[in-house]
């Protein structure tokens, strides 16, 4: 049985290789992206527990450690407790570095116990150098970061907010930390605008067995903070879970597309061997044996594809993690991850072979032996179109006959056509959905800023993400004092978790009640903000939280009273809430800071000149026109890069499936193609016929993908809390992009089969059985 399975797979080497390649690409994505997600989680584990800390204290409701803010006074208070051996503050932040849009910075006390685990391999640790230039601060670089930036001890590096001198190179064994940098806690507070704050307090106990007892005491003493065991902190960070989920989502997409190709291949292989199966049944093979043979072939394809995919995924990790832009995504291969990838491949093999094997087992010997398949030409169904005529009208008629033959050929194998279109539509639907979501966020964000006649928007220069943008309030006063500026409104945006509603995050917006920008939120029930500890909610958010005017809502460590319900027409705004600027500064750990400044000028025609003046006088900010701000946001630009990467993945995986389908079609119609060639068809015409079939399949995939994306968008909109801020924007530009991707996919998948068909010899083709 095993030898027959291998022989059957070897009989159509090209088809087998393409099927294996489709599965291998999906499995490779599982391994590569899964390893990156696991690398981040492992890096967070090392960050929290690698120092030997038993407990970690963070801000309650904080979305991630990088956004947490705890008063630094807590460090000394905790250190004075009788059961505590030592307590030290730490800060984790995200800045930009040369060639690195996302560069993690760790701030530690130079004399604290936590910094000791950064093993210096070159230079010296912080606070030891006497050669640091005035105005330049010290930094330790991880070995991978130093290699990526091509820096060594003594060099200077420019980060968001300041220049640092490299005094040492370290290693920790954690790829996440070795691709980052370490500075003093005081420098981190200044660099990341966390004055008199730390991101977390790491607590080392005299007796680790008393961890639960000390934790209970700290929870009573600090009810507005979260106290957790350090070993469990990584799994509590929403950022880690979100990145892991996104990675698995992309990998799952690739696997599903490859699985559809697997089903298509096994089904067509079974159809092709119908008479052979009939002969085996006539020789005494039972139904279970037939089913086992076909099912075994499918499992073998999945197993081989899984092995190749695991090897390819592991090989991809090196080049990807060496890219400076992705240096923080250090991959970590684990046996469970490889096991999951192999199990996925085997399950796909089984799922892809189940129906074909069941269908084959139901064939009776007589039915199977009568099957003509695709190698015979049925005069009742196959008609050679007329040769090109010299007359224009006849030529036009012949062209329509040619187009009809292409559609007829696709209809002849409806199952194969549907499976191929399904595989293509999955990839195209993901492109439409994700690009549409990004476009929707950009449109809504620009509408938010332009709704109050805002002309300019300022954010922190070089900030890697709007969530990390922090501008001192004094900067806002400087901007307001410039001639030509009419008003300046500070805005804070961020996320908090809602544990009671089991929500991964909740959008919080901070506005000053007396400033003009808050007028954007139209109150439909209750009243607007008048002061602190008040909250206005979007209608969908209020419905989901089941609260109304007068009710109390707890956001993180803060309790607020709902004073109004608003509507703006923008889903992501209506899925969140607005609080006072002062409350937002406390809640999101931005004391005396804002994320953005919305600027209205006296004369809109001078907006560009005023923008240039602000940037020249205030180096800490970057200014954009309100209509262009969202497109210039780093996170949006990175999202578009990711979208193109997904588009490329869809072309590769879908193209492999397309190529497989068209090769099967060419094999099946070999005698038909030979007949056409014998009747005068030139190679170019055969090439055009097969390529057009491939492109038509892709265009059908566009239609199916558009419908599927609309369905998926609607389903996403039904998800509590998430669906309230997800808006898919369908635009002509988006469909033009998808159309180009589809045509490229059709050309990529159909070129080799078309070339193969065009080069068939008429004599050899007519002899084909």
Image (cartoon, rainbow, N blue to C red):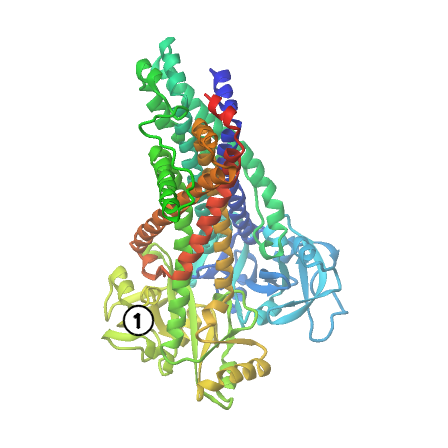
Q: Horizontal placement of 81 versus 549: left or right?
A: right
Q: Disc 1 marks which residue?
A: 568
Can the viewer see residue 348 in this picture?
no
Q: Position of residue 383 (x, y in %)?
A: 35, 32
Q: Horizontal placement of 309 versus 548: left or right?
A: right
Q: Between residues 418 and 312, which one lies in front from this camera angle?
A: 418
Which residue sits at x=35%, y=38%? 418
Q: Is residue 445 above or below residue 238?
A: below
Which residue sits at x=72%, y=75%? 134
Q: Between residues 47 and 1, which one lies in front from this camera angle?
A: 1
Residue at disc 1, secondary structure: loop
Q: Position of residue 608 (x, y in %)?
A: 51, 82
Q: Between residues 479 and 313, which one lies in front from this camera angle?
A: 313
Q: Horizontal placement of 104 versus 361: left or right?
A: right
Say how many tags the image has. 1
Name the quadrant of the C terminus.
top left
Q: Is residue 606 above or below residue 27?
A: below
Can the viewer see residue 157 in this picture?
yes
The residue lying furthest to the front in this view is 391
Q: Horizontal placement of 59 versus 723: left or right?
A: right
Residue 292 sits in which quadrant? Answer: top left
- Crowding near pointer 1: few (<14 within 10 Å), some, many (20+)? some
The residue lying furthest to the bottom in this view is 483
Q: Is residue 271 above or below residue 369?
A: below
Q: Position of residue 725 (x, y in %)?
A: 35, 61
The residue lying furthest to the right in this view is 131
Q: Position of residue 580 (x, y in %)?
A: 37, 75
Residue 145 sits in which quadrant? Answer: bottom right
Which residue sits at x=32%, y=50%? 707
Q: Between residues 560 and 516, which one lies in front from this camera angle?
A: 516
């Amino acid at each position: 049985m095993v030898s027959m399975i291998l022989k059957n797979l070897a009989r159509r080497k090209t088809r087998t290789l393409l099927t294996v390649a489709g599965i291998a690409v999906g499995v490779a994505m599982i391994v590569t992206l899964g390893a990156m997600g696991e690398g981040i989680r492992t890096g967070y584990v090392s960050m929290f527990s690698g120092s030997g800390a038993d407990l970690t204290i963070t801000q309650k409701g904080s979305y991630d450690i990088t956004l947490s803010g705890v008063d630094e006074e807590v460090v000394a208070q905790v250190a004075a407790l009788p059961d505590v051996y030592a307590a030290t503050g730490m800060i984790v932040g995200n800045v930009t570095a040369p060639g690195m849009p996302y560069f993690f910075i760790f701030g530690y006390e130079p004399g604290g116990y936590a910094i000791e685990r950064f093993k210096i391999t070159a230079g010296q640790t912080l606070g030891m150098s006497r050669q640091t230039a005035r105005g330049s601060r010290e930094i330790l670089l991880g070995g991978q970061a130093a290699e990526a930036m091509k820096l060594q001890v003594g060099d200077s590096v420019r980060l968001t907010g300041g220049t640092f001198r490299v005094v040492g190179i370290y290693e920790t064994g954690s790829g996440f930390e070795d691709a980052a940098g370490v500075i003093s806690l005081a420098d981190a507070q200044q660099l990341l605008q966390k004055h008199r704050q730390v991101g977390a307090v790491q607590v080392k106990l005299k007796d680790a067995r008393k961890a639960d007892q000390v934790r209970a005491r700290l929870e009573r003493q600090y009810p507005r903070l979260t106290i957790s065991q350090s070993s469990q902190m990584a799994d509590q960070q929403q950022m880690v879970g979100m990145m892991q989920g996104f990675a698995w989502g992309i990998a799952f997409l690739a696997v599903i597309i490859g699985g559809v190709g697997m089903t298509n291949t096994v089904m067509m292989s079974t159809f092709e061997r119908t008479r052979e199966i009939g002969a085996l049944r006539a020789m005494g093979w039972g139904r279970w044996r037939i089913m086992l043979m076909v099912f075994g072939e499918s499992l073998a394809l999945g197993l081989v594809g899984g092995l190749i995919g695991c090897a390819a995924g592991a090989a991809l990790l090196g080049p990807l993690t060496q890219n400076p832009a992705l240096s923080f995504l250090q991959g970590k291969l684990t046996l469970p991850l490889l096991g999951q990838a192999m199990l996925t491949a085997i399950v796909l093999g089984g799922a892809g072979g189940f129906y074909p094997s069941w269908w084959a087992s139901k064939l009776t010997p007589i039915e199977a032996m009568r099957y003509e398949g695709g190698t015979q030409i049925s005069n009742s169904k196959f008609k050679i179109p007329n040769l090109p005529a010299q007359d224009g009208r006849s030529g036009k008629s012949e062209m329509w006959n040619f187009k009809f033959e292409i559609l007829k050929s696709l209809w002849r194998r409806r199952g194969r056509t549907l499976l191929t279109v399904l595989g293509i539509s999955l990839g195209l639907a993901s492109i439409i959905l994700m690009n549409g979501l990004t476009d929707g966020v950009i449109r809504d964000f620009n509408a938010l800023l332009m709704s109050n006649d805002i002309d300019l928007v300022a954010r922190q220069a070089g900030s890697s993400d709007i969530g990390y943008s922090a501008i001192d309030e004094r900067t806002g006063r400087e901007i307001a004092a410039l001639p030509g500026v009419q008003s300046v409104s500070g805005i804070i945006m961020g996320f908090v978790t809602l544990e009671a509603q089991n929500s991964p995050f909740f959008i919080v917006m901070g506005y000053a009640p007396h400033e003009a920008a808050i007028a954007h939120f139209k109150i439909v029930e209750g009243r607007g903000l008048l002061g602190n500890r008040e909250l206005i909610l979007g209608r969908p958010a209020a419905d989901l939280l089941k609260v109304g005017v007068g009710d109390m809502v707890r956001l993180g460590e803060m309790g607020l009273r709902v004073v109004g319900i608003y509507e703006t027409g923008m889903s992501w705004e209506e899925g969140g809430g607005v609080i006072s600027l002062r409350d937002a500064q406390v809640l999101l750990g931005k004391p005396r800071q804002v994320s953005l400044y919305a600027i209205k000028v006296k004369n809109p025609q001078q907006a560009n000149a005023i923008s240039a003046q602000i940037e020249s006088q205030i180096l800490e900010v970057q200014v954009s026109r309100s209509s262009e701000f969202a497109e210039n946001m780093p996170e949006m630009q990175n999202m578009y890069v990711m979208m193109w990467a997904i588009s490329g993945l869809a072309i590769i995986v879908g193209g492999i499936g397309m190529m497989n389908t068209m090769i099967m079609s060419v094999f099946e119609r070999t005698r038909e193609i030979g007949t056409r060639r014998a009747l005068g068809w030139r190679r170019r015409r055969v090439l055009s016929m097969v390529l057009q079939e491939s492109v038509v399949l892709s265009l059908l995939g566009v239609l199916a993908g558009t419908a599927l994306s609309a369905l998926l968008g609607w389903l996403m909109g039904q998800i509590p809390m998430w669906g309230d801020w997800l808006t898919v924007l369908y635009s002509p530009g988006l469909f033009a992009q998808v159309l180009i991707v589809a045509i490229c996919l059709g050309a990529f998948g159909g070129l080799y089969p078309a070339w193969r068909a065009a080069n068939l010899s008429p004599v050899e083709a007519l002899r084909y059985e």
